[in-house]
Amino acid sequence: MKFVLRLITVILVLAPAAGAAAAPRAKKQRMLYISQSKGFVHGSVNRNGKPLAPSEESVTQIATESGIFEVECTQDASVLTPEKLKTLDVVMFYTTGKLPITPENFTAFEEWLKSGKAMIGAHSATDTFGDFKPYSSLINGTFDGHPWGAGETVTMTNHEPTHPTVKMLGEEFQWKDEIYQYRNYDPKSVRVLYSLNMAKCKTKAAYHVPVCWVREFGKGRLFYTNLGHNEGTWTNPKFKEHLLAGIRWALKLDDGPAEPNPGVQALEMAKSFVAVAGAEAGKNADELMAKVKAGAKDAAWLEKLAADIAAARRINAKTKDGDAVKAERARILAEIEKK
């Protein structure tokens, strides 16, 4: 009888462990990383005769070390078909030019994303498809030059240092990389997480330049960072942590807000304008910013100010008329001073 009782005790003790060992492992998410170049070929996506390009090696390493997803790297975007989408959870783009994705297949991709899937964009994902509106509206921007070249170290302001995708970067940080500015950009469509701090950048512009943003698209999520031109970015542990956090967020493994923050962006537009146009006009930046912050209590006034600053940028881009730009900047500065 004692033997039977001991046997039963052993079985009861071992049963949970055996059950735990038999529990199935969590299924890995499936990523397709597209790095096809139909325009400029970045060094970070150039395989140079090797099996994988530097960015592909980095993403593959992130996948292996995190254990969260497995990745298939391709430089042929035509594989993105409705049938392929059925096997995927996340699609990542580091691409240029007009990709061989038919309008029908792109519509299927949009529906796939809306259903609750994930999209990641790195660097020149915003230099893809040109002015093809469905794509530019989705990613929310089209390349419009890069005044901040690959050799320049820029200073970024992190607008939401508690957000899981950017909390590793701190409230302010420096980065050596090529930074884009955009057209086809709608501040009411995305939540910007960090931007150039014009007051602390060597190359200056009198307008807001966002660098990283997130958005929800139907039930799906999109994470985009403009970083990644330089090959050194892809070997930087902090960038790898940042990218993994973006992937986790897009896959809904971590949570964090995605509601658009046009108010934050409008204030950044004003800060950039004051730092550059105000300084050029010999104005006191601190006094101007105090007036901007006072005026910002009126959301409509701040929104109009941001729109006027954006319009002044377009005057310069379209006409290259320095006198017209100077006159418009003076008018905007006068409006700020009235506050």
Image (tube, helix red, strand yellow):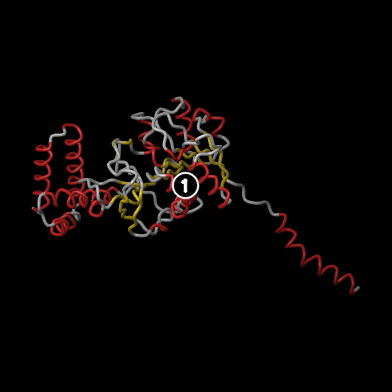
Counting from the top left corner in percent of width and height, residue 116 is at: 49, 42
**Left or right of 44, for residue 151:** left
Q: Nearer the viewer, residue 160 or 207?
A: 207
Q: Residues within 10 Å of mark 1 (few under 14, many from 20)?
A: many
Quarter in which the C terminus is drawn: bottom left
Q: Secondary structure at mark 1?
A: helix
- Residue at the limit of the structure toward the front, as seen here: 49
Quarter in which the N terminus is drawn: bottom right
Counting from the top left corner in percent of width and height, residue 202 is at: 25, 50
295 versus 85 height, above or below: below
88 versus 167 height, above or below: above
Q: In the figure, residue 207 lies in which quadrant?
A: top left
Q: Nearer the viewer, residue 177 or 129?
A: 177
- Residue at the limit of the structure toward the right, as seen here: 1
Q: How many marks?
A: 1
Q: Nearer the viewer, residue 125 or 201?
A: 201
72 versus 208 height, above or below: above
**Left or right of 302, for residue 143:** right
Q: Nearer the viewer, residue 262 or 32?
A: 32
Counting from the top left corner in percent of width and height, residue 41 is at: 42, 34
- Pointer 1 residue: 250
Please report the residue visible at 47 percent of the width from the left and 47 percent of the height from the top: 250
- Which residue type does callout 1 highlight? Ala
Counting from the top left corner in percent of width and height, residue 82 is at: 53, 30
Please report the residue visible at 45 percent of the width from the left and 40 percent of the height from the top: 44
